[in-house]
Amino acid sequence: MGLFMPIVLGILVLPFLSVGAPAQAPLRPETASRNWMVRDVLEASSLSSAGRPMSWRMGYPLGDPGGDGQWDFIAFASDPWGGADLLSAFSTGHGGIPEVQTTLPLITRFEWGNAALPTIAPIRAGVTQELAVIAPMSQEVHFLDPVSHALLDILFLPPPAPGFPPLDWFASIANVGDLEGDGYEELRFTGTALTRFVVGLIDGATHGVRWQYWGDVEEWPTILHWIGPNGPADLNGDGIGDVLISYTTYKWQTGLPMENQQIALSGADGVPIWVHSFRQSSWRRPGVVSPDVTGDGLPEVFSLPLALTESVALLDGGTGQPIWEVPETELEPLLPGGRIWTLFQYPVLFVPSLDPSLPYELVVSVEFQLRPRENHRGLVHLSPVDGRPLAWEEFGGDLQPWSSDPLNAPNLAGQGTWLMGDGDGDGFPELAHLVPDLALSGPRWVFRMVVLGQQTLFGPER
């Protein structure tokens, strides 16, 4: 694994070009699919001294930290032939074209494909906001002003819990919400120590570490995922919001399949409230917190387990027990015929339902192949009450080549689509979808970022 050395630089300017589509891909909304409308196609401008084009890799929605009515978004741009990653901040006003503002003062050098990307977490800190950033394999968490990107504070690796080895580095961070109701949102961090992993809670007010939870998994590699906050919810009734995590392990010594653990941790001390295990078919399939279905006031946990076939499941947030689990075979009437293989993927959306008897609809991304090396992507709508299939959507042919999904590309590591935020103010978030530029040749793919609007996703023609 390459050596990561974060280098703090002055604020850089990373321009990018909003380009028209190639001849084979109409971009005007009036010609786009009724389900998805291409809002924009963004290209990372050339930043390398050799004049090679940069490639988008990953992004994070930030909300509106500046309070100017524009939603902000952070994206990574990389040199696919080299190894420089830049964090580019840009924003879009309601109905406007994205405009680059600046880049965060962080550049990481590494060998492409050998490690994780940096992670970012916006948090509310009293009446202001902060942006927490870590570089891969970093021993520091940097707290930045989300508008000026000025450095506010640094958190160094904490000492380990008694009886455990010292931590090697921070692996990831994420916002878990205001657990105590003091106006400061907390951060969950993950770290590694030899072949063990640790989950810890960072106090939003003091930036100190409150507690650590050490996993009992000793096999390597262990990849830890975060289940995003939806509340946060008090699962054990102690008046403090609790933390939901998910991790996947592969017992490579024995050749056993992957196992995904969904765990609810007490926000007060990190002690597990409940644990539920699934067999798994992919590293990057964490759980996602969904709205309340059972009526107990607590959120549920959506997951993508692997039984005898691909399946979709919903867990009770209070107990961790399955509410329902639907295998791929029960979705056959909706899915395209002639598939070689099928994989349920992310993002997972929770959208308004046309059926007044349902609290919402669960929308799951489905990746499939009709012939070798030709990936397609669609969306299946499910009832959150019992998991029954409701509808199927697929990127239309008029969005080609944007409908081809690059999730299997090795330099994306499975991350190809994210929610950006509601940039046009229609109440539905836009999607950022990475697609390869097939016209550019070289040892690595160059990815454009296609911004897709969802305002027609819930129309009667669905």
Image (tube, grey):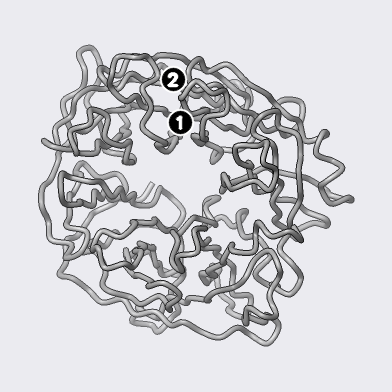
Q: Nearer the viewer, residue 436 or 96?
A: 96
Query: Does 297 sit above or below residue 85?
Result: above
Residue 196 position by quadrant: top left
Left or right of 147 on screen, residue 428: right
Which amino acid, mark 1?
Thr
Q: Residue at x 54, y 56 (%)?
A: 417
| Residue 97 image offset from top left, x and y in percent | 43, 78
Number of callouts: 2
Q: Which residue is mark 1?
A: 222
Residue 447 visible: no
Left or right of residue 110: residue 26: right
The answer to whether the residue labelled 2 contacts the one labelled 1, judged by CB atoms less than 8 Å apart, is yes
Q: Nearer the viewer, residue 276 or 220?
A: 276
- For disc 2, the marked residue is 217
Foreground residue, 238 or 114? Answer: 238
Q: Is residue 326 in view from this perspective?
A: yes
Q: Of label 2 and label 1, which has the lower sequence position? A: 2
Residue 460 versus residue 233 in the image, above or below: below
Q: Quadrant of residue 84?
A: bottom left
Element under label 2? loop
Gap between marks 2 and 1 measured at Cα: 8 Å
10 Å crowding of disc 1: few (<14), some (14-19), many (20+): many
